[in-house]
Amino acid sequence: MTILVTGGAGYIGSHIVQELVERQQPVIVLDNLSTGFRHAVPPEAPLFVGDVGDESLVSRLMDEHRVKAVMHFAASSVVPDSVANPIGYYSNNTAGSLALLRAVARAGVRYFVFSSTAAVYGNPDGQSVGEDCIPRPMSPYGMSKLMTETMLRDAAAVSGLSYMVLRYFNVAGADPKLRTGQSNRAATHLVKVAVQAALGVRNGMEIFGADYPTPDGTCVRDYIHVCDLVSAHIAALDYLRGGGPSATLNCGYGHGYSVREVVDTVKRVSGADFAVAMRPRRAGDPASIVADTRAIRRLLSWVPAYDDLDTIVRHAMAWERKLMAQR
């Protein structure tokens, strides 16, 4: 059974592809390389350069390679950018996913794993957010993902498609074997930005908002190592293949760190100091969002292996040093 990975040359998608190849699963990759990289895709996985919204291309790939499972990562994913360019995000994320789902229906794909986001929750009440929390996205990015979740659910209801929606919290770190990582030099992920500042790739960094209702005034997030996210995806696909019903699950650790805590950790682990400028809040940023992870641990028997901020930072730093050496 061939697996199509959309966005498989990007940060998270490339980690998934590496794991599928290692498990000797037949896999093909579709990526337009707008934020992905050819070098991130292992040679064992054929890479097709194109857009997920190109229905004729996607249908042809599915027919030629007998695709029966899709893992969908292709999307724009920067919250402030979505606020500035909402139409672009709905076009790429929502309309692109709609085209993909039409191709999926024609090809008779049986399993679909969707890369969603905790941004669908908005700014929830309480210490942690469960999957039954009513979604209230604060940004077009979050709304574009929620709309795709809705389309997927409704499409599956009238077909034989089984799906898993995985709502990511803040993904960070890199492959410990340094086969792939976050390669986009202009990435906005906090750990990546702080590591670049520590290594001198950036001239310091900024913190947006220090007046949130959190212990130190900065935003609190649940950070998950990308390799633990990979294991969750593999478990989700295995679950669906084993006849498990469709589900929506959080992907996080169940505890959070503030922006200041992450920055302090990067400084301590790297042994480097760097300038940190305070800026006003950004539109679309909730104060605090931490996952309730009981459902994914129970349903998929998922046990994370890298639940340690120091480890996440060390792996991110090792990857950044590799990129610096290559440059």
Image (spheres, rainbow, N blue to C red):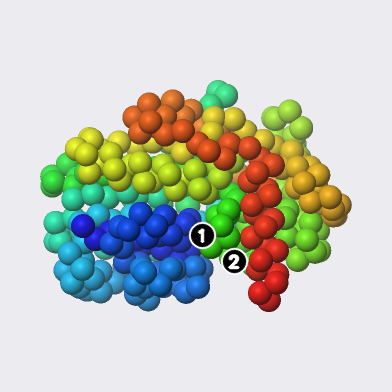
Q: Residue 11 — which label?
A: 1
Give the tally of numbered discs: 2
User: What residue is at 59 percent from the left and 30 percent from the top?
Assistant: 255
Who is closer to the viewer here, 303 or 255? 303
Above/below status of 277 relative to 299: below
Disc 2: which residue: 184
Q: Is residue 114 left or right of residue 87?
A: left
Q: Is residue 52 above or below residue 144?
A: below
Residue 57 showing in the rendered view: yes
* Percent of width and height locating residue 139: 51, 48
Quarter that holds the N terminus: bottom left
Does 30 sit left or right of 283 as displayed?
left
x and y percent of residue 4 in the render? 29, 61
Nearer the observer, 308 or 151? 308
Q: Please, which residue is most extreme toward the top here?
A: 126
Quadrant where the image shows the C terminus: bottom right
Location of residue 29 by image quarter: bottom left
Q: Earlier in the sequence, mark 1 or mark 2?
A: 1
